[in-house]
């Protein structure tokens, strides 16, 4: 089974002509509400693509948004989440421009309550059933670090999306099985390690992998697909699906969820990357976060 430890939000999306500039006031073309949060996006991706139960350690507020998200989790057989009294559910305020590019402001709310104690309770209950666990940085970083150490000790494979990237503890990356930064996040992590800017992209990636000792490095490159270096230092590019982009929100989360689903089925690293690329490619042709996630059958059809 696959588990997720992470965030849940209500996404409040403003569709605009262009990303608002500093000091500018801009009228939105439309306003939409979607279920979101990197953790929840990944959990729903796994549920939708696998048709299996998903174990999800997250916290919701005891408010209207929390009730709506909880009902959505029940629809997808997602288990393990907590309801926090006197807390507001996390929110993400998202601008999406015509090209599909977006900008996001987070209010963490109840996500800050995903602490070590809750992670321990969650894993005490479910860890014997878990093969793969997905992590991101939208919960307290000390909780992420605790989860990495405990999951690694238990032999559970870790798929870690270091986003938001600023607080990522590079010293713990050697305990991660699959690290999945995007290009901007990868550059930030390289700068944090003082890896030379003068190296070309592929050498820089290899230097990063060797320095951190992460098992498998996957760099998400958006419309260019992804680049990987596996645990034997084999490397290469996987091309993206050619599509017309409408909204890139949650594409990276769909990628991680899809990769985990296919890897649990096949244990084939490259084929799982191909599956993930196609799933993410389909998702950017649709509006919203979880509403954009394709089915397993859709992805397999496009793969063929």
Image (cartoon, helix red, strand yellow):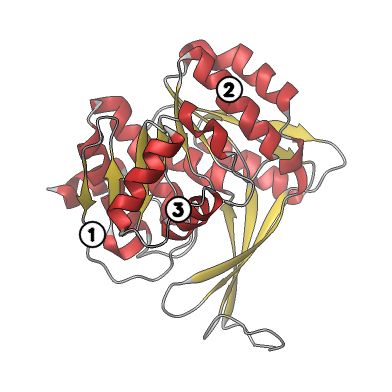
Q: Can residue 169 be seen at all in this image of the molecule?
A: yes
Is residue 268 left or right of 112 when viewed as pictured? left
Q: Earlier in the sequence, mark 3 or mark 1?
A: 3
Residue 292 position in % (x across, y down): 42, 56
Give the residue pinned by disc 1: 241
Is residue 179 left or right of 301 when viewed as pictured? right
Q: Which mark, residue 186?
A: 3
- Which residue: 45% across, 36% down? 212
Q: Earlier in the sequence, mark 1 or mark 2?
A: 2
Q: Quadrant of residue 258?
A: top left
Circle 1: element type: loop
Q: Are marks 1 and 2 in contact (CB under 8 Å)?
A: no
Q: Quadrant of residue 246?
A: bottom left
* Residues at marks 2 and 3, CA–CA distance in whole angstroms: 22 Å
Residue 120 position in % (x across, y down): 67, 18
Q: Which mark, residue 7?
A: none
Circle 3: element type: helix
Give the residue pinned by disc 2: 149
């Amino acid at each position: 089974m696959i588990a997720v430890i992470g965030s849940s939000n209500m996404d409040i999306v403003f569709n605009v002509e262009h990303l608002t500039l500093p000091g500018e006031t801009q009228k939105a073309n439309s306003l939409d509400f979607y279920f979101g949060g990197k953790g929840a996006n990944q959990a729903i991706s796994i549920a939708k693509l696998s048709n299996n139960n998903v174990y999800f350690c997250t916290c919701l507020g005891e408010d209207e948004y929390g009730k709506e998200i909880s009902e959505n989790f029940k629809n997808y057989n997602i288990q393990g989440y907590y309801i926090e009294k006197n807390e507001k559910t996390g929110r993400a305020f998202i601008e999406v421009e015509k090209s599909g590019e977006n900008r996001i402001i987070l209010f963490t709310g109840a996500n800050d309550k995903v602490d070590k104690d809750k992670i321990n309770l969650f894993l005490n209950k479910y860890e014997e059933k878990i093969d793969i666990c997905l992590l991101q940085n939208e919960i307290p970083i000390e909780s992420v670090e605790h989860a990495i150490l405990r999951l690694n000790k238990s032999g559970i494979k870790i798929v870690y999306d270091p986003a938001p990237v600023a607080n990522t503890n590079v010293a713990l990356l050697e305990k991660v099985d699959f690290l999945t930064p995007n290009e901007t996040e990868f550059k930030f992590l390289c700068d944090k390690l003082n890896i030379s800017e003068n190296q070309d992209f592929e050498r820089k990636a290899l230097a990063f992998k060797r320095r951190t000792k992460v098992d498998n490095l996957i760099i998400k490159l958006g419309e260019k697909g992804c680049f990987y270096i596996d645990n034997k230092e084999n490397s290469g590019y996987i091309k993206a699906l050619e599509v017309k982009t409408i909204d890139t929100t949650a594409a990276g989360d769909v990628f991680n969820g899809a990769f985990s689903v296919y890897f649990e089925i096949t244990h084939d690293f490259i084929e799982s990357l191909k599956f993930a690329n196609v799933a993410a490619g389909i998702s950017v042709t649709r509006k919203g976060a979880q509403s954009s996630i394709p089915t397993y059958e859709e992805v397999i059809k496009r793969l063929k």
